[in-house]
Image (spheres, rainbow, N blue to C red):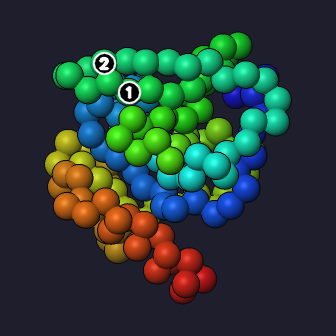
Amino acid sequence: MCGAIRYRVAEEPLTLYACHCTDCQRHTGGSFALSMIVRRDALAILRGEPVPYESTAEGRTRRGRFCAACATRLWGEPSRLPQIRVLRPGTLDDTSWIVPVAHIWTRSRQPWVRLPEDAVAFDTQPDDPMALVALWRERRARS
């Protein structure tokens, strides 16, 4: 938000989705969180030093990085998948192309949130997380 941290993503994301779980609602202070999955090696810090954070809720620990100057959360670092980063795409310079391929945890979405009629939606987490990657690839192949 303040520009103290600058980063670059050197390749296309693996997927981008909206999560409506209550953890994401609390973490963002909004009705959902956008998550852009990128390979860890594709993320390069250009300026500044993101600060690590760790939070535990309901027995689940989340780790990631944020800007110490303005407290903007930049990305998550899943311990089960250390080769990826869960980037907050709203921190990108250009957000005009950001459209989620799916909405997950829609059973806990706020009742006033209306999904597009053609939106792919999952009540909870997809049984196969690679389904979100496949949806991204299908969309990219059509465009």
81 vs 45, nearest the viewer: 81
Point out the image quarter for the C terminus: bottom right
Q: Is residue 22 visible?
A: yes
Residue at horizontal 54%, vertical 35%? 75
35 vs 83, nearest the viewer: 83
Mark 1 in CB contact with mark 2 (< 8 angstroms):
yes
Residue at horizontal 49%, vertical 75%? 137
Kind of residue at disc 2? Thr
Residue at horizontal 46%, vertical 80%? 138
- State the CA–CA distance, disc 1 to disc 2: 6 Å
Task: First in sequence, mark 1 or 2: give its number.
Answer: 2
Residue furthest bottom as drawn: 142
Point out the image quarter for the N terminus: top right
The image shows residue 110 at horizontal and vertical percentages of 26, 41
Q: Is residue 112 visible?
A: no
Residue highlighted by disc 2: 56
Residue at horizontal 27%, vertical 40%? 21
118 vs 28, nearest the viewer: 28
Q: Is residue 88 left or right of residue 7?
A: left
Quarter of the view holding residue 58:
top left
Q: Is residue 11 left or right of residue 120?
A: right
Disc 1 is placed on an element classified as strand
Q: Is residue 21 left or right of residue 136?
A: left
Disc 2 is placed on an element classified as strand
**Can you say whether 55 is above or below 118 in the image?**
above
Residue highlighted by disc 1: 62
Quarter of the view holding residue 32:
top left
Q: Is residue 23 left or right of residue 16?
A: left
- Which circle marks residue 122 in the picture? none
Q: Residues within 10 Å of mark 2 (few under 14, many from 20)?
A: few
